[in-house]
Amino acid sequence: MKYLIHKYVEIYKGFFKASLVADLEFRFNFFLLICAEFVWYASQLVIYQVLYRHTKLIGGWGQDQMRVFMFLALFVDSIYMILWDSNFSKFNDDVRKGQLDLLLTKPVNSMFMTSSQKISISHVPCFFITLTGLIWSLNQLPDFSWLRLLWLLIMIPSGLTVIFCGRFALNATALLFTRADFLQYVWYSLFRLGLRPDGIYSSLMSGIFRKILIFILPFAMIASVPTRFLLEPFQPSLLVWALIMPAILIALTHKYWQHCLKNYTSASS
Amino acid sequence: MAFWRKNLAFSQLAIVTNLEYRFNFFIDAYLQPLITVGIEILLWIALFEANNSNLIGGFTKEAYLAYGVWAPFLGRVAISWMYESMMVEDVASGNINIVLTRPISFYEYYLSQLMGYKVITTFLSLLVPLFVSFYFKLPVQYEKIPLALTLVFFYLFLLHTMSFIVSSIAFFITKVRSFTLIKNLSLFVLAGELVPFDLMPETLKNVLTALPFSSGVYIPVAYITGRIDHRVVMNGFISVFVSFILFSIVARMIWKKGLLEYTGTGA
C-alpha cells in the first residue's frame, strides 16, 4: 500500500513538473488564460449584483450571504479547474484520434491516468483570488464563527467529488459513441445548477426539486450545502450524506467507466 | 454562380460532417438546449416564487421566462467555439497549407461551413424554444421570429470575422486558445445572454444595447418578446454592419502581415 501511494505521488510530481513547463512555455497565453478566468468569475458575480438591485432576498439569503456562496462556488470550481478540467476537455479528442489507447496501456489506474495527466497552473492565481474573496465575504458577516471553516475540510472534497464524477461519467460516454464532443456543453449547462443557491428551489414542487439537487443530482453539494454549514445551524443528516455520497459516486463512476471500457472499440488503427 | 455553388458545397459538407455522428448532433441540437432552457426557467420561476412578487425590474414572470427560453437558444447560435478552434488549429499546425492552395479563401472556406452548421442546428433545435413558449403560453410574438433570426445570422458574419482575426493572430503567437476564451466569455456578457440588460442601470443598458454584440442575443430576444420595437432592430443591423466593416479592415491587415510571416512546411 505504502509503495502504491509513493508510486502515485511520484507520478503526480512528474505530471506537475511537465504541466508547469508546458504552461510557462507560452507566457502570453498563460497570462491571457488567467484574464479569461477573471472575466468568467466576474460575470458570475455580476449576475447576483444585478439581481440584488431588484430584490432583497434570493433563496432566503441577502447579498452578504450570497457573496459567501458565490466565492465558495468559485473557489471549489478553481480547485477543479487546476486538477482536472484540462484533462476532461481534451478527453473527447483523445478518444476520436485514438490517443486514449496509449494512456490505457500504462501500468497505472486508467481513471487516474485519463483525469490527472495535466495540471492547469494558469488557474492557481484564481485559487488564491477566490480564497481571498471567500475570506473577505465571511469577514463582512457580523457574527461569523471562524471555527466553522473547519467544515469545509469535509464539504469541499465532497463537492469536488460531485464535479469529478459528473464530468468523468459524461466523458466516459464518448467511449460508446466515438464522437460526443457536445456532451461537454451539456456539462456546462448542468453545472449552472451548482452555481445557484439551492434555497431558490425551496418553494418549487414543494421542495422536492431541492431534495433532488442534494440527493440525486447532487449539484447542491458543490457550494450550497457547504455554505449552509458556514452560515446556518448544523444539520447532522447533511453531514452524514456528505461523508457517504463521495464513496457512492466514485463506486458508480468506476463501474460505469469499466462498462464503457468493455464496449470501447479503439479509434486508432 | 460558381461562387455560390462553391460555398454551398462547403455548407453541405458541414451539414453532412455534423450529421455523421448523430448522437453528437442530437446532443447539440436538442439535449443541450433543452437542459439549458429547463435550468433557466427553473431559476426565474424560483426567483419569483421566493420573492412572492409579480414584477422584477418592471417585467413579469412570463416575460423573464420568455427571455430565459430564447436567450440561451440564440446564445448558442451566436457563438463560435468549434469552427474558431478549427481555424486556429489549421494556422498553428500548418494545415492551412491545404486551404491556401485551394480556389477558395480561408475566410470563405470556414464561413460557408459555419453557416451550414448554424442553419441546420438552428432550424432543428428551434422546435425546443417554440414548444416551450407554446406550452407555457409565454409572451412571444411569433411573427417577429424571422426578422430576429435574420439579425442573428447577419451577426454571424461579424462573429466569423472576429474568429478570423483570432486565427490570424496564430501566425504570430502559436497558442491563442486564451484569445478565444476571453472573446467568447466577453461576448457572453456583452450579448446579454448572462442577464437581461433591462435589469441593469439605464445608462449601462443603453451603452450595451448600442454595441453590435447585443444583436446576437439581447436585441432579437427583446424584439420577439415585445420589449423593444422595430427601430432598435434596424439600429442593430446598422451597428453590426459598421462593426463588420471595421473588423474586416483589421482582419485583412493582420491576415496579410501574418501570411508574410508564415512559412509553410511539409508536402
Image (tube, coloured by chain):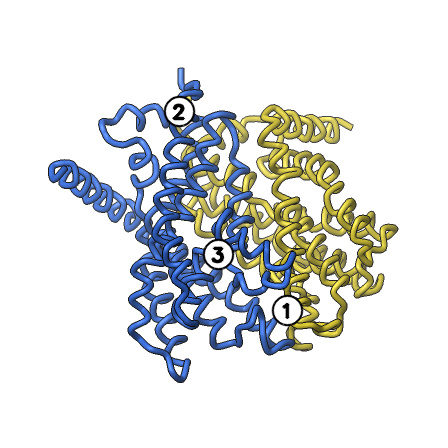
Q: Residue at x 38, y 62 (%)?
A: A236
| Count of labels in the image | 3
Q: Return the x and y of residue A165 as percentages of the image width and height.
A: 41, 42
In which quadrant will I find the N terminus of chain B? top right
**Furthest residue to the right?**
B143
User: Which sits earlier in the primary sequence, circle 2 or circle 3?
Assistant: 3
Q: Which of B169 and A132 lies nearest the eye of the viewer?
A: A132
What colour do you see for chain B?
yellow
Q: Residue furthest top?
A: A269
Where in the figure is residue A72, as x and y percent of width and height?
41, 64
Neighbour tally class for label 2: few under 14, some 14-19, many 20 plus, Cα within 10 Å: some
Mark 1 chain = B
Residue A73 occupies quadrant: bottom left
Q: For the residue marked with disc 1, what is the amino acid? A: Ala
- Check the image and report above or below for A9 versus B193: above
For marks 2 and 3, give the CA distance: 30 Å
Q: Amino acid at mark 2?
A: Leu
Query: Mark 2–mark 3 contact, CB under 8 Å?
Result: no
Quadrant of the rendering where the C terminus of chain B is positioned: top left
Label placed on residue A220: 3
Task: Provide the chain ID for the residue under circle 2.
Answer: A
Question: Quick one: label 1, few (<14), some, or many (20+) residues within 10 Å?
Answer: some
SS of the residue at dot 1? helix
**Whether residue A29 is visible:** no
Q: Residue A124, image x and y in percent?
A: 31, 58
Q: Position of residue A56 (x, y in %)?
A: 60, 78
Q: Colour of chain A?
A: blue
Quadrant in the rendering for residue A12:
top left
Marks 1/3 in contact by CB < 8 Å: the verdict is no
Which residue in the protein does label 1 denote?
A: B50
Residues behind callouts 2 and 3 on a single chain? yes
Instruction: Provide the residue designation for mark 2.
Output: A261
